[in-house]
Amino acid sequence: MGFFSKLLNEFIDIIEWVDTTQDTLVWKFPRNDNAIKMGAKLTVRESQAAIFMNEGRIADVFMPGMYELQTENMPILTTLLSWKYGFNSPFKADVYFVSTRQFVNQKWGTKNPVMIRDAEFGPVRLRAFGSFNFKVQDPKVFLNQISATNPDFNVAYIEEQLRNTIVARGMDAVAQSKIPILDLAANYNEMGLLISDTIQPDFAEIGLTLSKLLVENISLPAEVEAALDKRSQMGIIGNLGAYAQFQAANAMEKSAENSIGGNLGAAGMGLGVGAAMMNQVGNVFKQNNFDGANPSGADAPPPFPTTQYHIAVDGKSDGPHSLADIDKMIAAKAINKETMVWKKGMAAWVAAGTVAELDDLFNNEPPPLA
Protein backbone atom coordinates (compact mmCIF):
# COMPACT_ATOMS: atom_id res chain seq x y z
CA MET A 1 0.00 0.00 0.00
CA GLY A 2 1.45 3.37 -1.07
CA PHE A 3 1.83 6.37 1.20
CA PHE A 4 -1.00 8.27 -0.43
CA SER A 5 -3.36 5.26 -0.25
CA LYS A 6 -2.59 4.86 3.46
CA LEU A 7 -3.20 8.55 3.97
CA LEU A 8 -6.56 8.37 2.23
CA ASN A 9 -7.62 5.55 4.54
CA GLU A 10 -7.31 8.01 7.44
CA PHE A 11 -10.18 9.99 5.98
CA ILE A 12 -13.81 9.04 6.60
CA ASP A 13 -15.75 8.67 3.38
CA ILE A 14 -18.98 6.93 4.49
CA ILE A 15 -21.18 8.30 7.28
CA GLU A 16 -24.29 6.36 8.29
CA TRP A 17 -26.17 4.88 11.26
CA VAL A 18 -27.80 1.47 11.25
CA ASP A 19 -29.92 1.56 14.40
CA THR A 20 -30.30 -1.90 15.96
CA THR A 21 -31.75 -0.66 19.26
CA GLN A 22 -35.30 0.13 20.35
CA ASP A 23 -34.61 3.04 22.67
CA THR A 24 -31.81 5.20 21.23
CA LEU A 25 -32.74 8.81 20.57
CA VAL A 26 -29.34 10.29 19.67
CA TRP A 27 -26.15 8.55 18.49
CA LYS A 28 -22.82 10.22 17.77
CA PHE A 29 -20.91 9.00 14.74
CA PRO A 30 -17.52 7.69 16.01
CA ARG A 31 -15.06 9.94 14.18
CA ASN A 32 -12.17 9.43 16.62
CA ASP A 33 -10.20 12.42 15.32
CA ASN A 34 -10.31 11.12 11.78
CA ALA A 35 -11.05 13.79 9.26
CA ILE A 36 -14.14 13.67 7.08
CA LYS A 37 -13.21 13.64 3.42
CA MET A 38 -14.80 16.28 1.25
CA GLY A 39 -17.09 14.36 -1.09
CA ALA A 40 -17.83 11.69 1.51
CA LYS A 41 -21.17 9.90 1.30
CA LEU A 42 -23.75 10.66 4.00
CA THR A 43 -26.73 8.29 4.27
CA VAL A 44 -29.66 9.40 6.39
CA ARG A 45 -32.32 6.72 6.56
CA GLU A 46 -36.04 7.19 7.05
CA SER A 47 -36.92 8.16 10.64
CA GLN A 48 -33.46 9.71 11.08
CA ALA A 49 -31.86 13.14 10.92
CA ALA A 50 -28.13 13.95 10.84
CA ILE A 51 -26.72 17.04 12.53
CA PHE A 52 -23.21 18.39 11.93
CA MET A 53 -21.68 20.29 14.85
CA ASN A 54 -18.56 22.44 14.72
CA GLU A 55 -16.76 23.42 17.91
CA GLY A 56 -19.91 22.97 20.01
CA ARG A 57 -22.19 24.87 17.62
CA ILE A 58 -24.96 23.21 15.60
CA ALA A 59 -24.35 23.67 11.91
CA ASP A 60 -26.17 21.84 9.11
CA VAL A 61 -29.10 19.44 9.53
CA PHE A 62 -29.74 16.69 6.98
CA MET A 63 -33.07 14.92 6.69
CA PRO A 64 -33.57 11.42 5.10
CA GLY A 65 -31.66 10.95 1.85
CA MET A 66 -28.17 10.29 0.42
CA TYR A 67 -25.76 13.21 0.18
CA GLU A 68 -22.29 13.81 -1.24
CA LEU A 69 -20.75 16.30 1.15
CA GLN A 70 -19.65 19.46 -0.61
CA THR A 71 -19.46 23.06 0.43
CA GLU A 72 -22.63 23.70 -1.54
CA ASN A 73 -24.86 21.47 0.66
CA MET A 74 -23.18 22.52 3.93
CA PRO A 75 -23.77 26.28 3.87
CA ILE A 76 -23.64 26.88 7.64
CA LEU A 77 -20.57 24.73 8.24
CA THR A 78 -18.87 26.39 5.26
CA THR A 79 -19.54 29.78 6.86
CA LEU A 80 -18.32 28.68 10.29
CA LEU A 81 -15.07 27.35 8.81
CA SER A 82 -14.60 30.50 6.68
CA TRP A 83 -14.49 28.64 3.39
CA LYS A 84 -15.12 31.79 1.41
CA TYR A 85 -13.98 30.40 -1.92
CA GLY A 86 -14.81 26.73 -1.45
CA PHE A 87 -12.68 24.05 0.12
CA ASN A 88 -12.05 20.48 -0.95
CA SER A 89 -9.67 19.25 1.74
CA PRO A 90 -10.73 16.99 4.65
CA PHE A 91 -12.40 18.67 7.60
CA LYS A 92 -13.39 17.80 11.16
CA ALA A 93 -16.94 17.97 12.54
CA ASP A 94 -19.04 16.06 15.06
CA VAL A 95 -21.92 14.19 13.46
CA TYR A 96 -25.00 13.27 15.52
CA PHE A 97 -27.80 11.06 14.26
CA VAL A 98 -31.22 11.70 15.80
CA SER A 99 -33.96 9.08 15.63
CA THR A 100 -37.29 10.59 14.56
CA ARG A 101 -39.33 7.39 14.76
CA GLN A 102 -42.13 6.88 17.29
CA PHE A 103 -41.24 5.50 20.69
CA VAL A 104 -44.34 3.58 21.72
CA ASN A 105 -45.86 2.09 24.86
CA GLN A 106 -44.15 4.44 27.28
CA LYS A 107 -45.80 4.18 30.70
CA TRP A 108 -47.09 7.02 32.87
CA GLY A 109 -48.94 7.02 36.18
CA THR A 110 -49.44 8.81 39.48
CA LYS A 111 -46.97 7.78 42.19
CA ASN A 112 -49.39 8.95 44.89
CA PRO A 113 -53.14 9.70 44.83
CA VAL A 114 -53.98 13.15 43.49
CA MET A 115 -56.65 15.24 45.23
CA ILE A 116 -59.54 16.27 42.96
CA ARG A 117 -62.67 18.23 43.94
CA ASP A 118 -65.83 16.56 42.64
CA ALA A 119 -69.18 18.35 42.49
CA GLU A 120 -71.06 15.35 43.94
CA PHE A 121 -68.61 13.75 46.39
CA GLY A 122 -66.43 16.73 47.31
CA PRO A 123 -62.64 16.21 47.65
CA VAL A 124 -61.59 12.75 46.47
CA ARG A 125 -58.22 11.14 45.79
CA LEU A 126 -57.56 9.66 42.34
CA ARG A 127 -54.95 7.36 40.88
CA ALA A 128 -54.45 7.21 37.11
CA PHE A 129 -52.13 5.44 34.71
CA GLY A 130 -51.78 4.70 31.03
CA SER A 131 -49.32 4.78 28.11
CA PHE A 132 -48.10 7.27 25.53
CA ASN A 133 -46.16 7.50 22.26
CA PHE A 134 -43.76 10.30 21.37
CA LYS A 135 -41.13 11.18 18.79
CA VAL A 136 -38.57 13.89 18.02
CA GLN A 137 -40.27 16.62 16.02
CA ASP A 138 -37.39 19.12 15.83
CA PRO A 139 -33.98 17.35 15.97
CA LYS A 140 -32.06 20.63 16.25
CA VAL A 141 -34.08 21.84 19.26
CA PHE A 142 -33.91 18.44 20.96
CA LEU A 143 -30.13 18.22 20.54
CA ASN A 144 -29.68 21.77 21.74
CA GLN A 145 -32.08 21.58 24.73
CA ILE A 146 -31.83 17.98 25.97
CA SER A 147 -29.20 15.57 24.65
CA ALA A 148 -26.42 18.16 24.06
CA THR A 149 -23.09 16.37 23.44
CA ASN A 150 -24.13 13.03 24.94
CA PRO A 151 -22.80 10.45 22.44
CA ASP A 152 -25.50 7.86 23.21
CA PHE A 153 -28.74 9.32 24.50
CA ASN A 154 -31.66 6.90 25.02
CA VAL A 155 -35.24 7.03 26.28
CA ALA A 156 -34.29 6.16 29.87
CA TYR A 157 -32.63 9.56 30.29
CA ILE A 158 -35.83 11.48 29.63
CA GLU A 159 -38.75 9.17 30.43
CA GLU A 160 -39.01 10.31 34.07
CA GLN A 161 -39.30 13.95 33.02
CA LEU A 162 -41.97 13.10 30.43
CA ARG A 163 -43.99 11.07 32.96
CA ASN A 164 -43.86 13.88 35.52
CA THR A 165 -45.05 16.37 32.90
CA ILE A 166 -47.96 14.16 31.92
CA VAL A 167 -49.07 13.58 35.53
CA ALA A 168 -48.72 17.22 36.60
CA ARG A 169 -50.42 18.76 33.57
CA GLY A 170 -52.79 15.84 33.03
CA MET A 171 -54.34 15.85 36.48
CA ASP A 172 -54.88 19.61 36.20
CA ALA A 173 -56.72 18.97 32.94
CA VAL A 174 -58.89 16.28 34.58
CA ALA A 175 -59.79 18.64 37.42
CA GLN A 176 -60.63 21.51 35.07
CA SER A 177 -62.76 19.29 32.83
CA LYS A 178 -65.43 19.08 35.62
CA ILE A 179 -66.34 15.56 34.47
CA PRO A 180 -68.05 13.80 37.42
CA ILE A 181 -66.06 11.05 39.10
CA LEU A 182 -68.69 8.45 38.25
CA ASP A 183 -68.45 9.37 34.54
CA LEU A 184 -64.67 9.25 34.18
CA ALA A 185 -64.62 5.55 33.24
CA ALA A 186 -66.90 6.28 30.30
CA ASN A 187 -64.68 9.14 29.09
CA TYR A 188 -61.17 7.66 28.96
CA ASN A 189 -60.79 8.55 25.29
CA GLU A 190 -61.88 12.16 25.92
CA MET A 191 -59.52 12.34 28.89
CA GLY A 192 -56.63 11.12 26.74
CA LEU A 193 -57.26 13.79 24.09
CA LEU A 194 -57.67 16.50 26.73
CA ILE A 195 -54.42 15.60 28.50
CA SER A 196 -52.60 15.33 25.17
CA ASP A 197 -53.70 18.81 24.06
CA THR A 198 -52.73 20.24 27.45
CA ILE A 199 -49.16 18.94 27.53
CA GLN A 200 -48.34 19.23 23.82
CA PRO A 201 -46.70 22.69 24.30
CA ASP A 202 -44.41 21.27 27.03
CA PHE A 203 -43.20 18.58 24.63
CA ALA A 204 -42.72 21.09 21.81
CA GLU A 205 -40.42 23.20 24.00
CA ILE A 206 -37.84 20.40 23.94
CA GLY A 207 -38.34 19.40 20.31
CA LEU A 208 -40.73 16.50 20.91
CA THR A 209 -44.31 15.79 19.94
CA LEU A 210 -46.81 13.63 21.80
CA SER A 211 -48.33 11.43 19.10
CA LYS A 212 -50.74 9.51 21.33
CA LEU A 213 -51.77 9.30 24.98
CA LEU A 214 -54.03 6.61 26.42
CA VAL A 215 -55.75 6.61 29.80
CA GLU A 216 -56.01 2.98 30.86
CA ASN A 217 -57.43 3.39 34.35
CA ILE A 218 -58.60 6.05 36.80
CA SER A 219 -59.32 4.61 40.23
CA LEU A 220 -60.46 5.75 43.66
CA PRO A 221 -59.05 4.58 47.02
CA ALA A 222 -60.36 1.18 48.15
CA GLU A 223 -62.49 2.61 50.97
CA VAL A 224 -64.19 5.08 48.62
CA GLU A 225 -64.90 2.34 46.08
CA ALA A 226 -66.41 0.22 48.88
CA ALA A 227 -68.70 3.12 49.84
CA LEU A 228 -69.76 3.51 46.20
CA ASP A 229 -70.53 -0.21 46.06
CA LYS A 230 -72.79 0.18 49.10
CA ARG A 231 -74.50 3.11 47.46
CA SER A 232 -75.07 1.06 44.32
CA GLN A 233 -76.58 -1.76 46.39
CA MET A 234 -78.97 0.70 48.04
CA GLY A 235 -80.03 1.98 44.64
CA ILE A 236 -80.69 -1.55 43.38
CA ILE A 237 -82.64 -2.58 46.50
CA GLY A 238 -84.86 0.49 46.33
CA ASN A 239 -87.34 0.37 49.27
CA LEU A 240 -85.02 -0.27 52.20
CA GLY A 241 -87.87 -0.51 54.71
CA ALA A 242 -89.54 -3.35 52.81
CA TYR A 243 -86.16 -5.05 52.36
CA ALA A 244 -85.42 -4.91 56.09
CA GLN A 245 -88.84 -6.37 56.93
CA PHE A 246 -88.26 -9.12 54.40
CA GLN A 247 -84.94 -9.97 56.04
CA ALA A 248 -86.59 -10.05 59.48
CA ALA A 249 -89.35 -12.33 58.19
CA ASN A 250 -86.72 -14.71 56.82
CA ALA A 251 -85.05 -14.77 60.24
CA MET A 252 -88.39 -15.65 61.89
CA GLU A 253 -88.98 -18.43 59.40
CA LYS A 254 -85.57 -19.95 60.10
CA SER A 255 -86.25 -19.76 63.85
CA ALA A 256 -89.56 -21.60 63.37
CA GLU A 257 -87.81 -24.32 61.35
CA ASN A 258 -85.18 -24.73 64.04
CA SER A 259 -87.90 -25.18 66.70
CA ILE A 260 -89.02 -28.51 65.27
CA GLY A 261 -87.56 -31.06 67.65
CA GLY A 262 -85.57 -28.32 69.43
CA ASN A 263 -85.97 -25.93 72.31
CA LEU A 264 -89.42 -24.35 71.98
CA GLY A 265 -88.56 -21.62 74.47
CA ALA A 266 -85.45 -20.53 72.57
CA ALA A 267 -87.35 -20.67 69.30
CA GLY A 268 -90.07 -18.51 70.82
CA MET A 269 -87.50 -15.97 71.88
CA GLY A 270 -86.05 -15.96 68.35
CA LEU A 271 -89.49 -15.47 66.82
CA GLY A 272 -90.30 -12.68 69.24
CA VAL A 273 -87.05 -10.89 68.59
CA GLY A 274 -87.48 -11.30 64.83
CA ALA A 275 -91.01 -9.91 64.94
CA ALA A 276 -89.94 -7.00 67.08
CA MET A 277 -87.04 -6.31 64.72
CA MET A 278 -89.37 -6.35 61.73
CA ASN A 279 -91.71 -3.81 63.34
CA GLN A 280 -88.98 -1.57 64.73
CA VAL A 281 -86.79 -1.57 61.62
CA GLY A 282 -89.81 -0.86 59.45
CA ASN A 283 -90.72 2.06 61.69
CA VAL A 284 -87.17 3.40 61.60
CA PHE A 285 -87.11 3.44 57.81
CA LYS A 286 -90.51 5.07 57.66
CA GLN A 287 -89.40 7.78 60.08
CA ASN A 288 -86.35 8.42 57.91
CA ASN A 289 -88.54 8.65 54.81
CA PHE A 290 -86.88 5.71 53.03
CA ASP A 291 -90.16 4.08 52.08
CA GLY A 292 -91.35 7.08 50.08
CA ALA A 293 -94.88 6.92 51.49
CA ASN A 294 -94.64 10.10 53.57
CA PRO A 295 -91.81 12.35 52.35
CA SER A 296 -92.24 15.03 54.98
CA GLY A 297 -92.93 12.79 57.97
CA ALA A 298 -94.85 15.61 59.68
CA ASP A 299 -98.40 14.35 58.99
CA ALA A 300 -97.82 10.69 59.92
CA PRO A 301 -100.16 9.53 62.76
CA PRO A 302 -98.59 7.93 65.85
CA PRO A 303 -98.63 4.11 66.02
CA PHE A 304 -101.89 2.59 67.35
CA PRO A 305 -101.37 1.25 70.90
CA THR A 306 -101.47 -2.55 71.17
CA THR A 307 -101.70 -4.94 74.10
CA GLN A 308 -98.33 -6.49 74.92
CA TYR A 309 -97.55 -9.55 77.08
CA HIS A 310 -94.46 -10.85 78.79
CA ILE A 311 -93.85 -14.59 78.41
CA ALA A 312 -92.12 -16.92 80.86
CA VAL A 313 -89.39 -18.80 79.02
CA ASP A 314 -87.07 -21.12 80.98
CA GLY A 315 -87.97 -19.32 84.18
CA LYS A 316 -87.21 -15.89 82.74
CA SER A 317 -89.38 -13.07 81.45
CA ASP A 318 -89.27 -12.51 77.70
CA GLY A 319 -91.01 -9.63 75.99
CA PRO A 320 -93.04 -7.60 75.72
CA HIS A 321 -94.77 -9.18 72.69
CA SER A 322 -97.79 -7.96 70.77
CA LEU A 323 -100.82 -10.16 70.08
CA ALA A 324 -99.58 -10.52 66.51
CA ASP A 325 -96.24 -11.80 67.78
CA ILE A 326 -97.93 -14.25 70.16
CA ASP A 327 -100.17 -15.48 67.36
CA LYS A 328 -97.07 -16.33 65.32
CA MET A 329 -95.50 -18.09 68.32
CA ILE A 330 -98.65 -20.18 68.82
CA ALA A 331 -98.60 -21.13 65.15
CA ALA A 332 -94.96 -22.11 65.49
CA LYS A 333 -95.75 -24.21 68.61
CA ALA A 334 -93.34 -22.03 70.57
CA ILE A 335 -95.91 -21.47 73.37
CA ASN A 336 -99.05 -23.29 74.53
CA LYS A 337 -101.99 -22.70 76.89
CA GLU A 338 -99.88 -23.61 79.92
CA THR A 339 -97.23 -20.99 79.15
CA MET A 340 -97.23 -18.35 81.89
CA VAL A 341 -97.91 -14.79 80.72
CA TRP A 342 -98.25 -11.34 82.27
CA LYS A 343 -99.23 -7.89 81.08
CA LYS A 344 -99.45 -4.48 82.67
CA GLY A 345 -102.39 -4.34 85.13
CA MET A 346 -102.36 -8.05 86.00
CA ALA A 347 -101.74 -8.95 89.65
CA ALA A 348 -99.73 -12.09 88.88
CA TRP A 349 -98.55 -14.43 86.17
CA VAL A 350 -101.27 -16.69 84.75
CA ALA A 351 -101.51 -19.47 82.19
CA ALA A 352 -102.00 -18.19 78.66
CA GLY A 353 -105.12 -20.35 78.22
CA THR A 354 -106.87 -18.51 81.07
CA VAL A 355 -106.63 -15.12 79.33
CA ALA A 356 -109.63 -14.64 77.08
CA GLU A 357 -107.95 -12.79 74.23
CA LEU A 358 -105.08 -15.28 74.22
CA ASP A 359 -107.39 -18.26 74.49
CA ASP A 360 -109.10 -17.07 71.31
CA LEU A 361 -105.75 -17.27 69.54
CA PHE A 362 -105.32 -20.89 70.64
CA ASN A 363 -108.83 -21.70 69.42
CA ASN A 364 -107.99 -20.45 65.92
CA GLU A 365 -106.14 -23.69 65.24
CA PRO A 366 -108.20 -26.54 63.73
CA PRO A 367 -108.66 -29.71 65.86
CA PRO A 368 -106.51 -32.73 65.01
CA LEU A 369 -107.82 -35.03 62.28
CA ALA A 370 -109.54 -38.17 63.58
Image (cartoon, rainbow, N blue to C red):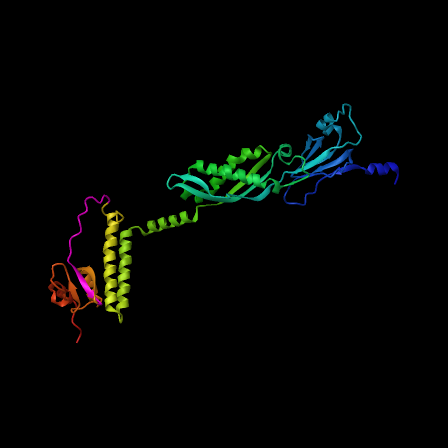
| Residue at 38% from the left image edge and 39% from the top image edge | 119
2 sits to left or right of 113: right
Of residue 237 and residue 334, the one placed in the foreground of this image is: 334
Asked whether 300 falls inside the magenta stretch, the response is yes
Q: What stretch is highlighted in magenta?
A: 295-314
Residue 239 location in percent, x, y? 28, 51
On the image, which quarter does residue 352 sit in? bottom left
Q: Is residue 45 visible?
A: no
On the image, which quarter does residue 62 sit in? top right
Q: Can residue 204 be seen in this view?
A: yes
Q: Is residue 136 above or below residue 266?
A: above
Q: In which quarter of the image is the C terminus?
A: bottom left
252 sits to left or right of 165: left
Residue 182 location in percent, x, y? 40, 44
Q: Is residue 52 above or below residue 327?
A: above
Of residue 310 and residue 348, the one placed in the foreground of this image is: 348
| Residue at 68% from the left image edge and 43% from the top image edge | 19
* Magenta stretch prevailing secondary structure: loop
359 sits to left or right of 168: left
Residue 243 location in percent, x, y? 29, 54
Q: In this view, does 111 lie above or below 201?
A: below
Q: In which quarter of the image is the N terminus?
A: top right
Q: Is residue 151 above or below residue 324?
A: above
